[in-house]
Image (cartoon, rainbow, N blue to C red):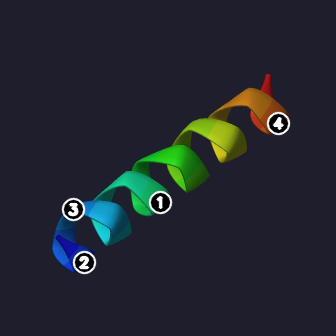
Amino acid sequence: MMKVMKMTLELEKEKREEDEEK
């Protein structure tokens, strides 16, 4: 369960960074 949460957080972070670049 913790692994999934960590993966989700990583994805959210990546998405946010991509949005900032645009």
Residue 20 percent coordinates (x, y)? 82, 36
**Secondary element at image label 4:** helix
- In this rendering, would 22 be left or right of 16? right
Front label number (1 vs 4):
1
Between the C-alphas of marks 1 and 4, the distance is 17 Å
Three-letter amino acid code of the residue under disc 2: Met
Within-10-Å neighbours for mark 4: few <14, some 14–19, many 20+: few
Q: Nearer the viewer, mark 3 or mark 4?
A: 3
Which residue in the protein does label 2 denote? 2
Neighbour tally class for label 3: few under 14, some 14-19, many 20 plus, Cα within 10 Å: few
Residue type at the position of mark 3:
Val
Q: Mark 3 or mark 1, which is nearer the start of the sequence?
A: 3
Spatial CA span between label 3 and label 2: 5 Å
Residue drawn at 58 percent across, 54 percent down: 13
Residue at x-position 35% and y-position 71%: 6
Where disc 1 sits, the SS reads helix
Residue wearing tag 4:
20
Q: Earlier in the sequence, mark 3 or mark 4?
A: 3
SS label for mark 3: helix
Q: Which mark is residue 9?
A: 1
Q: Are the residues at dot 1 and dot 4 in contact (C-beta closer than 8 Å)?
A: no
Q: Is residue 3 above or below residue 4?
A: below
Q: Quadrant of residue 15?
A: top right
Query: In terms of sequence position, does the residue under pointer 1 or pointer 4 come before the other?
Result: 1
Residue at 47% in and 60% down:
9
Residue tagged 3: 4
- C-beta proximity under 8 Å, tags 3 and 2: yes
Measured as percent of width and height from the top left, residue 5 is found at: 33, 64
Q: Residues within 10 Å of mark 1 (few under 14, many from 20)?
A: few
